[in-house]
Image (tube, rainbow, N blue to C red):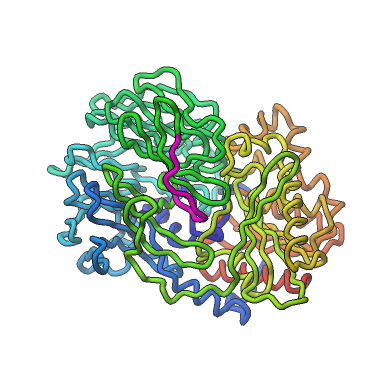
């Protein structure tokens, strides 16, 4: 379960059971279903506060880059470019030698583009756009110079992720005919009347580029999550499960879908979760990522291969102290992979014959390709790459070149200046684990003065806090206002191998909180931080950890729990993605209620002394509003300082910029009241 707008770049999409809103996934990226009635509170005015107004105005002007793509010959680059405060975005093309060229679509006006994909001969770019249509995306193509843009489809429904066939005659993509997409992070549609399990599955659609004929080639009964063309263009490797798609990603299996027959053959049933299957050059092997993952599109695990005809899967990175996140076949025996490594990223080459891994680059950045918000692309021969680079103090730009020898090809954010200090990479040990985190300081530190600190716990729990320009997020808000900000990566996070990611299974809130508190002690002991002015916050799993933390310790003097979980037992029956819970708890709540009860904050609610602000979206499908209401109700009944704000019409991620600003302002005011 991920944050609504994390501290580095917007992330995280699956699919939502909504009306025909084919563009909503695109709009959500530009911003970095509860069946119960939400309890609503009136909102205060949403005007910018004096404290955060200038910061939000600055960050809102950040030029953002998404869906970077490099032509197979390595000569041209494409990406979607937008402004952080806008939901619009257009595809740009560059040869890296001059300014980027926007693809012009006559009379289009505002539009949201996504998924640029180069043809095998590097002469044509395919992409999705809402140009000329309110919300519905259509597939477009344009020349390598950006000219001759042409609409190729008349789709009615959600569509995403175009991929060219190897012979360049067809484009395949994911399609929900007559249905919407966007994932459970979006606001769930209000549901009344008889509740049933009807849904539309996401299928693989194939467009013949010569005739513009569209065919859906995967079975209606399967929801397709990821797919890849076979080398002979006769089949697809796919991760898939029966619908509903939002809930069943956690039980997906590897299939081979034969185009001519439309049949899907299951070839591998994983023990955990699957992502991004990729076919080997000779067609005999399929590689993929498998691991304990809490969110579709946020990948980490080990790199596996399995024969494309079916058989035994092989783990090629077992025991590696990192979390592979994406992969590219370079040759039959070599795979390029991106990894989460510590609190940063790495790019490595894996030799399959002996599982030797050669490090090509690593750094304190967020670099990945597969999954949501990809920012790294590789040419066909692997000699050239393109990447969106940023860190806590440098705003994003497009860089290109051989791995680790990149040069900036854009200067769109050169004028952006951080209003906070330089981040520190912290490492500490706890109970045999080596734990990492980031500390973001205020812009200036006065000798002899101590400062308050806020701990921000990331969502997931299978996730990782990496450096990145905070287009949205509370880290910049707090640091710009004179706070230290600690962002730990406790056990359960990516970046230190599967054993570390699995270390909080059946132990939510216990070991991971001990890791967080050890990090707090380390930071307080090393930096001028006032131990009597500590705050804690987080969203989603971080919101749960906030609720849990203040039941276990009174060290924090203020808290904000965003989209938290108060009671794992009731949550199991309220959320619309309950399949994610079983790998972490070991069984359903009906089979082992005690493992859920022991980690529920509500069971320890009388121990809370920390003033706690609680925030949630009205139609949050991942962490339903009743969870926040239950926690708030208990605190209020016990006479503890608390406030609940339910944002009208919002889901797990807040879409309305005014609501995002209001949430930041409310949170800052709450912490200012109790910490300053």
Residue closer to the observer: 353 or 117: 353
| Viewer can see residue 303 | yes
In the image, residue 399 sits, relative to residue 321, either above or below, namely: below
Q: Which residue lies most toward the top here?
A: 311
Q: Is residue 10 magenta?
A: no
- Tell me the quarter of the picture where residue 233 sits: top left
In the image, residue 288 sits, relative to residue 473, either above or below, namely: above
Q: Quadrant of the C terminus?
A: bottom right
At 55% from the left edge and 54% from the top edge, which residue is drawn? 466
At 71% from the left edge and 78% from the top edge, which residue is drawn? 446
Across and down, in percent, residue 402 comes to: 33, 51
- Tell me the quarter of the picture where residue 381 sits: top left
Q: Is residue 2 left or right of residue 237?
A: right
Q: Which residues are magenta?
A: 357-367
At 29% from the left edge and 57% from the top edge, which residue is drawn? 78
Residue closer to the observer: 321 or 10: 321
Across and down, in percent, residue 508 comes to: 71, 41
Q: Is residue 318 left or right of residue 312?
A: right
- Tell me the quarter of the picture where residue 360 sits: top left
Magenta region, mostly helix, strand or loop? strand
Q: Is residue 360 magenta?
A: yes
Q: Is residue 604 left or right of residue 424?
A: right
Residue closer to the observer: 613 or 374: 374
Q: Which residue lies most toward the bottom here?
A: 50
Across and down, in percent, residue 277 comes to: 39, 34
| Viewer can see residue 650 | no
Q: Is residue 567 left or right of residue 23?
A: right
């Amino acid at each position: 379960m991920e944050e609504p707008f994390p501290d580095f770049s917007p992330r995280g999409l699956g699919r939502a059971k909504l009306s025909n809103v084919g563009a909503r996934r695109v709009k959500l990226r530009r911003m970095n279903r509860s069946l119960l009635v939400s309890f609503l509170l009136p909102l205060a005015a949403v005007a910018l506060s004096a404290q955060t107004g200038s910061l939000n105005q600055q960050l809102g002007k950040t030029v953002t880059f998404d869906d970077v793509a490099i032509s197979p010959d390595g000569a041209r680059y494409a990406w979607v470019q937008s402004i952080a405060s806008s939901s619009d975005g257009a595809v740009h093309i560059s040869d890296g030698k001059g300014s980027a060229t926007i693809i012009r679509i006559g009379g289009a006006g505002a539009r949201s583009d996504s998924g640029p994909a180069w043809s095998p001969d590097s002469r044509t770019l395919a992409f999705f756009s809402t140009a000329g249509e309110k919300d519905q995306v259509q597939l477009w193509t344009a020349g390598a110079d950006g000219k001759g843009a042409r609409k190729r489809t008349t789709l009615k429904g959600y569509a995403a992720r175009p991929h060219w066939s190897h012979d360049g005659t067809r484009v395949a993509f994911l399609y929900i005919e007559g249905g919407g997409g966007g994932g459970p992070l979006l606001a769930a549609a209000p549901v009344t009347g008889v509740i049933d399990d009807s849904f539309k599955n996401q299928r693989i659609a194939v467009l013949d580029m010569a005739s513009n004929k569209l065919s859906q080639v995967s079975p209606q009964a399967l929801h397709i999550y990821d797919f890849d063309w076979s080398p002979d263009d006769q089949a697809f490797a796919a991760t898939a499960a029966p619908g509903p798609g939002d809930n069943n990603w956690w039980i997906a299996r590897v299939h081979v879908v034969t185009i001519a027959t439309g049949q899907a053959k299951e070839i591998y049933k994983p023990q955990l979760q699957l992502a991004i299957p990729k076919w080997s050059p000779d067609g005999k092997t399929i590689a993929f990522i498998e691991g304990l993952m809490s969110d579709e599109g946020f990948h980490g695990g080990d790199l596996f291969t399995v024969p494309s005809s079916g058989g035994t899967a092989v783990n090629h990175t077992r025991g590696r102290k990192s979390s592979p996140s994406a992969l590219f076949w370079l040759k039959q025996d070599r795979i390029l992979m991106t990894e989460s490594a510590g609190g940063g990223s790495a790019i490595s080459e894996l030799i399959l014959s002996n599982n030797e891994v050669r490090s090509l680059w690593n750094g304190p950045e967020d670099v990945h390709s597969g999954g949501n918000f990809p920012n790294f692309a590789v040419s066909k021969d692997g000699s050239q790459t393109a990447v969106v680079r940023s860190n806590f103090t440098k705003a994003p730009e497009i860089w290109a070149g051989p791995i680790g020898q990149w040069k900036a090809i854009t200067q769109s954010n050169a004028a952006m200046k951080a209003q906070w200090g330089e981040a520190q990479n912290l490492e500490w040990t706890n109970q045999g684990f080596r734990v990492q985190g980031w500390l973001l300081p205020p812009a200036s530190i006065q000798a002899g003065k101590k400062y308050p600190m806020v701990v921000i716990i990331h969502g997931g729990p299978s996730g990782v806090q990496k450096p990145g320009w905070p287009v949205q997020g509370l880290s910049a808000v707090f640091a710009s206002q004179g706070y230290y900000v600690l962002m730990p990566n406790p056990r359960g996070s990516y970046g230190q191998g599967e054993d570390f990611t699995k270390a909080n299974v059946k132990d939510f809130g216990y070991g991971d909180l001990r890791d967080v508190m050890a990090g707090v002690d380390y930071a307080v002991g090393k930096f001028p931080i006032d131990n009597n002015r500590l705050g804690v916050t987080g969203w989603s799993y971080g919101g749960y950890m906030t609720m849990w933390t203040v039941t276990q310790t009174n060290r924090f003097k203020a808290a904000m729990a965003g989209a938290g979980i108060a009671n794992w037992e009731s949550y199991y029956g309220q959320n619309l993605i309950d399949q994610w819970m079983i790998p972490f708890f070991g069984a359903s709540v009906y089979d082992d209620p005690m493992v859920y009860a022991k980690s529920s904050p509500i069971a320890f609610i009388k121990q809370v002394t920390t003033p706690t602000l609680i925030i949630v979206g009205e139609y949050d499908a991942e962490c339903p509003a009743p969870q926040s209401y239950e926690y708030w109700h208990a605190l209020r009944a016990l006479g503890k300082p608390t406030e609940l704000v339910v944002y009208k019409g919002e889901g797990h991620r807040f879409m309305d910029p005014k609501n995002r600003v209001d949430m930041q302002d409310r949170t800052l005011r709450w912490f200012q009241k109790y910490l300053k």
